Amino acid sequence: MTALLYALGLITFFVAILASIGLHELGHMIPAKRFGGKVTQYFIGFGPTVWSKQVGETEYGVKAIPLGGYVKIVGMLPPDALDVAEQVEIDAATGNQIVKVRKSNTGMFTQLISDARAAEWELVKPEDADRLFYKMAWWKKVVVMAGGPSVNIAIAFFLFWGVFSTYGQQVDTIPEPGQPVLASVSECVLPYAEGDRPCTDEDPAAPAAEAGLLPGDTITSFNGAPVTDWDQLRDLIRDNEDGNAEIGYLRDGEAGSGTTSTTVEARPTSSTDETLTQVGFLGVTPTAQAVVETGGPIYTLQQMGSMTVDTAQALVTLPAKVFDVGQAILGLEERDPESPVSIVGGGRLAGETTSTDQLDVTEKLAFLVALIAGFNFFIGMFNFIPLLPLDGGHIASALWEAVRRGFARLRGRPDPGYVDAAKLLPVAYVVASALLIMGVVLIVGDLVVPLQVEF
């Protein structure tokens, strides 16, 4: 039964991701066709073709490696304006003009650009002259290229909305009611921004440690005032500044006391206000209980706003995190639980979640839906990075075209023409190679040193 549930979770995850890929490509294809562009291929996957069918001018199909997808929009790269005289020939049989691209160039990158341009224009027919992608208005190019990742973000929104409005999500915990029971006692005093690092010999001892307090102690009094809840104790500590403090507590049912002096440190004003204020500091954390929040579309948008910031930060550090995964593969360090995962790792997480007996059906479903939503959100954000061959690279080229032409009009200068994305192909090859390497590292990492779900 466990193996069956694992397979169910794995298959569900992969089918959902493949469906997301298909919808992503529809997000490109539909507006491209609406704007008059010619789409010759729509495929899910890469590599050898498993199945395809020609419908009108578009071939629809599935390829063997389900790690992505693509649509072929004719005319992504403009002809080289410097070689127009060499590119135009007359077909002797039909009398039509045929646009060709020079085949030989000096320099490796120049040759790569020429080869890519030649491959692009082999698909262009005389009747396609007004349907080429590069001739579209800049805003149409933006809509076409932004359509794919926008679909992924929309999928994430609706899936997160479904989870948040029904199951909810666990947010910041709050102290348990009654006299505070200590969950942890700080060994040293650290600046708020460095609160996660280990203590060193240079760090001053925390007042709570000097008083002899231990996790599990129940605080009963502070400077003679009976303590009834955490909010009261926190206010007493903060107001004490750097004064003496006598703390009463219960430990294993026996009363005890400790004496220390609180210290003044910069700490957030409250749990909802991150403004730092100089207040008295003891160095204790109460045991807490989880709070589950639910919400509708506005709540979902607010949560996704925070996710956007977190994802943008994660994208900046992605190469370093993938390098750490490589270190873990080689056994040089432990894999960070917060490290990125590939689609293989996502499938493993889905399988482990659906097969565990520590969660009920509702919890399993909520985790699986949130996992699929998270992957879609990351895919959408990732594709907006303004580098070719990602969608964001084409968006950036279209926006630059609009800016360049706009400035030319304002200055009364000749139209500078279309932006030639082919000139950025060397960057695209470097980025594509880096993405391939990172993808392989993550897949191997998810097989060799996989992350485990903590229930």
Image (cartoon, rainbow, N blue to C red):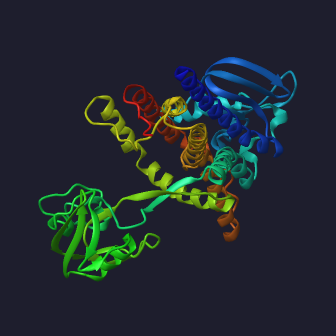
Task: Tell me how many marks there are.
Answer: 0
Task: Give the residue drawn at x 34%, y 33%.
Answer: 326
- Please provide percent x and percent y for residue 21: 65, 35
Task: Give the residue drawn at x 40%, y 67%.
Answer: 178
Compared to 13, does 416 lie above or below? below
Image check: 266 left or right of 96?
Answer: left
Compared to 278, does 16 lie above or below? above
Task: Give the residue drawn at x 35%, y 78%.
Answer: 235
The residue furthest right is 94
Q: Is residue 130 visible?
A: no
Quadrant housing residue 243: bottom left
The quadrant the C terminus occupies is top left
- Please provide percent x and percent y for residue 4: 57, 21
- Please provide percent x and percent y for residue 29: 75, 39
Q: Camera-side residue: 80 or 431?
A: 431
Q: Camera-side residue: 261 or 395?
A: 261
Task: Give the residue drawn at x 28%, y 80%.
Answer: 225
The quadrant the N terminus occupies is top right
- Please provide percent x and percent y for residue 10: 57, 27
Q: Is residue 187 visible?
A: yes
The residue furthest front is 253
